[in-house]
Amino acid sequence: MKVQFNSDREFDVIAIGRACIDLNAVEYNRPMEETMTFKKYVGGSPANIAIGTSKLGLKAGFIGKLANDQHGRFIEQYMRGVGVDTTNMAVDTEGHKTGLAFTEIKSPEECSILMYRDEVADLYLQPSEVNEDYIKKAKVLLVSGTALAKSPSREAVLKAIHLAKKHDVKVVFELDYRGYTWASPEETSVYYSLVAEQADVVVGTRDEFDVMENVAEGNNSETINHLFKYSPELVVIKHGVEGSYAYSKSGETFRGDAYLTKVLKTFGAGDSYASAFLYALITGKDIETALKFGSASAAIVVSKHSSSEAMPTVSEIEQLIAERSEKAEQTV
């Protein structure tokens, strides 16, 4: 099975939402209290996905709001430098700052993120700053859940989704749940459900779908039975090392194995998964192959220090898939 996209669009993907700064611990295997040096990268789930798809050769654009400061300029310059169209990134004029994420790498299993997200510029994107002519040039609008956490960003995203549906642009919803941004689990569930029901493709971890449904230990069949009453044609639910499942509205189920690797840190996996999965779908590959691309890309990024800068090329992903299938054949 393949997902169909409009072929006559200038952009393959336009992402909307958070672009911020990641400050990743240079010193591994120690708590943040003892970490003295950090390395700066562009971060934020939708920004990472735009960067990842651009590195894979797709034409990517971005809608967001940047602080009018050195960090904002760094983000814009970096994204433009890797081929992302930044013409629809607004600059904040009200003194809001760039979001910061400090990462702690205690061990491959113990990684945490300390976020500074109070009054950040990206959550002040106004609906008036979402351009209809820009959105209708895309095959896909990639929406990230964190952008729904506060107004006016929330309304800007809802407007973007409305425009995408008006112009037959596929809406892909990456759940990207960050609890500290939200007022309550009930609020999260309301807006996640609202957007998921309008999306064409929904991607997230099992835990994130639980947040959306406001349940503990939900199950995949109940999730898809609900969502397939609405717009989604494809739902991807990730289960960590157990791999991922893709469910189509037509009733097919696909399973993708996780690619085991030497893990340096756990963050960045979801963004790299989404960018490679999207790349595979948009370039006409079937869903089974798209799951392999997502898993391989995630394995590459968790073995490296950054998220955005570590986003792999097509040849790196294909090489890892080929190596693993060769190993699997040898063990049969």
Image (spheres, helix red, strand yellow):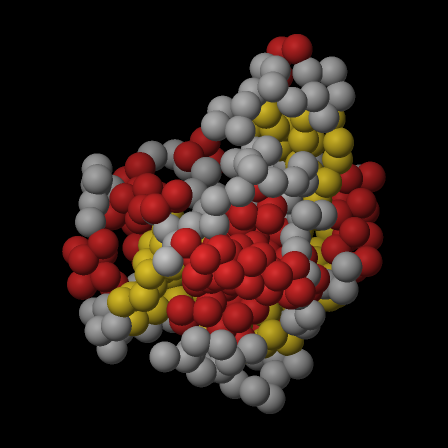
Q: Is residue 147 visible?
A: no
Q: How many marks are shown on the rendered structure? A: 0
Residue toward you, 33 or 194: 33
Expressed as whole percent of the image width and height from the top left, the position of residue 326 reads 51, 61
Q: Residue furthest bottom?
A: 8
For the point 29% across and 71% down, the residue is 248
Q: Is 289 displayed left or right of 242 in the figure?
A: right
The quarter of the picture where the N terminus appears is bottom left
Residue toward you, 319 or 57: 319
On screen, 201 above or below 104?
below
Q: Is residue 79 visible?
A: yes
Give the image quarter of residue 222. bottom left
Residue toward you, 166 or 239: 239
Q: Is 304 displayed left or right of 74 in the figure?
A: left
Give the image quarter of residue 42. top right
Q: Is 319 displayed left or right of 201 in the figure?
A: right
Q: Is 151 displayed left or right of 192 in the figure?
A: right
Expressed as whole percent of the image width and height from the top left, the position of residue 78 reads 79, 51
Give the image quarter of residue 39. top right
Expressed as whole percent of the image width and height from the top left, the position of residue 276 reads 55, 62
Expressed as whole percent of the image width and height from the top left, the position of residue 171 reads 45, 69
For the point 62% across and 11% down, the residue is 33
Q: Residue furthest top?
A: 34
On screen, 2 above or below 33?
below
The quarter of the picture where the C terminus appears is bottom left
Residue toward you, 86 or 82: 82
For the point 43% across and 76% down, the residue is 286
For the point 56% across and 87% down, the residue is 7
